[in-house]
Structures are given as structure tokens and as C-alpha cells.
Image (spheres, helix red, strand yellow):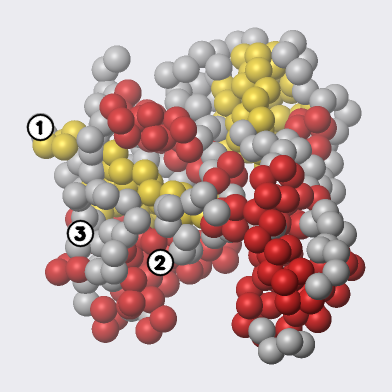
Amino acid sequence: MSPKRISEAQAAEAEIENQAAVVTSTTPMDRERNGEIEAALDADREMLVESLGGEPPGDVTDAEAWDDAIERFADTGKDHLAETMASKVEALRERAERSSPSLLRLRFRPEEPFEFVPGQYARISYEEEAPRVYSIASSPNRDEIELCIRRVPDGELTPDLCDRTVEGDELFLRGPYGDEFLLQDPTERDLVFVATGTGAAPFKSMIDYVFEEGLDEYEGEERDVWLFLGASWVDDLPYREAFLDLAAEHDNFHPVMTCSRESYMGNWDGETEYVQHTLLKYLDPDCVDTDTLPPDTTEFVGSEPAEDIDARIDPENAEVYVCGIGAMCNSVREVIEPLGVPDLYYEEESYG
């Protein structure tokens, strides 16, 4: 494959298609974990029985029993432990009560060729539901289009996509759209992608394309490619295994995953901070003036990272792409802007 140069002009010239497409596969990326959740609560049950006596609270979804036991536990003088336990139980209860699957990989094949560039999105509709737009997660070099679907419990389309779509179903497809959040023409700068949740979708397209087309090199020199991806739970990290497999093939690709709640299950030894704080751990501290950063973030610069990665990021030689909910994008921008990344090399797409 000969390298292609990505530009806004290309995207603007892309013809808007309006066509049918056939679903080729639907694959849940998360799983039902109630057994793990109950096992994770065993130590808390033992602590409550030892302190209070009587029968331990049952299933995590028995909110009244758990809340009452934790309140009585706090009254014994163990306020801090009770607060920690309450946060854990609330997070696990929320996870236990959610519908599954809540994160879906949806692949389909358009009837006609569908040309797009990484970072663009498509509009789809299914049966009688109103159409919605989704970032394209597949590389333009693939024959099938792939979307990363997060269930919105009260949504008009995502519950049907998660629960009902099967191989052979017909979708209605229109696009591509979007000419602003695109890969820039290659330079010597390292690439840094920062996302939470389904914000990883356009980056899956971009990163795959970068390595397929050899864009991780510039004038014979390798560029480091970083991905900082955050979620609550490990199975809420879209394409985690695919990114890890890609890293095994390319020494200059560095995926860093961070999960805020997975440690409640007791089996997570990766990063746990917000993505913007995790990013700061992997900067070259000699290239950072911490006096310019928000005061509550400086402790992360030079702190011990969870991942054993030799490379470090020089902000002044980085090209940064950020995608996720608006609050996350704002927080990332607050730490990126003082670091010396030129505005020309900072791209952001927010939603929600």
C-alpha cells in the first residue's frame, strides 16, 4: 500500500453516500461480571460480620441491606473504612445493574464502496429508529466498516443495536461526515492520542492506518505513537486487546490504559488516575515547567508510572489528539496548553 497524505481537503471532497449496508458481525466488548462482583465483596462482608455480628448483606443489588450495614459500621468509629466501603459498593452495584452488552463492536459491509479518511463519522439507522452518527473505528483500508457502540439506557437507537442486531440485518448508511478531526500530514513529531470510552473509536481508525501506511516514520526516523485510554472498568476499554497486540508488533507504539474502578475487583495493576494525570507521568520531566501547570497536577510529573515504557514525551515535539466527553477534553486541555504543544498540533473532538 502506498502512503496517503491525510488532509481536510480530501475529506471535503469525499462524496456523501446514502446506501444500504449488511451487518456482518456484532461482538460484545464487555461482559456480565456479577460473579466477580460478589466475590469482590466477600472481604467486606467478613469485616461487617466481625464488627457487627449477624448475617452479612446479600447480593450487591440489595441496596437497603448494604446501606444499613455500612451506616452501622461507621457508627462503630470506622468512618474512613465505611466511606471507602460505601464508594466500592455503590460502584459495584451500578455495574451489576447495568444491561449487557453495553459496549458493542458492530461491523457491516456497504453495498457500494464507502470512502472515508480516519477521524470521520457515519450516520446509520436501523429499522424504524431515528438515525444517529458514530465515529468510524475501522481503517479505510478494510472492506468492512466498524463502529464502537456504547449503550445509552434510554436511547432511541443504541439499545436496539446492542440487543437486536444480528448478522445479515440491513442498516441504512450515510456519510462520511466530518472534515475537522483528522490526521495531519506526517511530520517528525510524535503522535499522542488521549481518549475515554468510545472516544477511542476514531483513534482505532487513525492508529491502524498510521501503521498500515508507514506513517509512524518520517524521513527514515521512527515516531513514537502513544495512546492514553481511560474507562471505569477494564472491559469498558474499547479495543484493549487489539491495541496490546499492535504494541507487541511495533516497539514505537505505547498504549497506556487507566481504569478508575477496576481495582475494586482486586485484579488491576495498571494506571488508575484520570487520563490527563496519567499522561503527565509519561512526560519527560526535563521538558516540563511544572510552574505553568495547574497546582493539583504537578505531583504527577515525574511520578512512578505503572507501565514499563522506556520512551517519554517531549510536549514541544508532540502532535496531540483528544476525544471524549466534554469535561474530560476540558481537563486534558488545561494540562496540555501550558506544556508548549503548539495550537497547530492540538486537535480535539468532544461530545456529551
Image point (48%, 38%), residue name: 240
Question: How packed is label 3: few (under 14 Cα within 10 Å), some, or many (20 or more)?
Answer: some
Q: In x, y percent, where is residue 115?
A: 50, 21
Image side of residue 261 versus residue 337, left or right: right
Question: Tag 2, which secondary structure?
Answer: helix
Query: Quarter-wise, where is residue 292 in the image?
Result: bottom left
Q: Are marks 2 and 1 in contact (CB under 8 Å)?
A: no
Image side of residue 166 versus residue 275, left or right: right
Q: Nearer the viewer, residue 324 or 130?
A: 324
Q: Amino acid at mark 1?
A: Gly
Look at mark 1 in the image and give the residue it sits on. 220
Query: Quarter-wise, where is residue 219 in the image?
Result: top left
CA distance separating discs 2 and 3:
16 Å
Nearer the observer: mark 2 or 1; the answer is: 2
Locate the C terminus and report the quarter of the image it occupies. Answer: bottom right
Q: Earlier in the sequence, mark 2 or mark 1?
A: 1
Look at mark 3 in the image and give the residue it sits on. 314
Q: In x, y percent, where is residue 327?
A: 57, 66
Would residue 9 be seen by someone viewing this image from the given angle?
Answer: no
Name the residue at the left extreme: 220
Look at mark 2 in the image and give the residue it sits on. 277
Question: Tag 3, which secondary structure?
Answer: loop
Q: Which mark is residue 212?
A: none
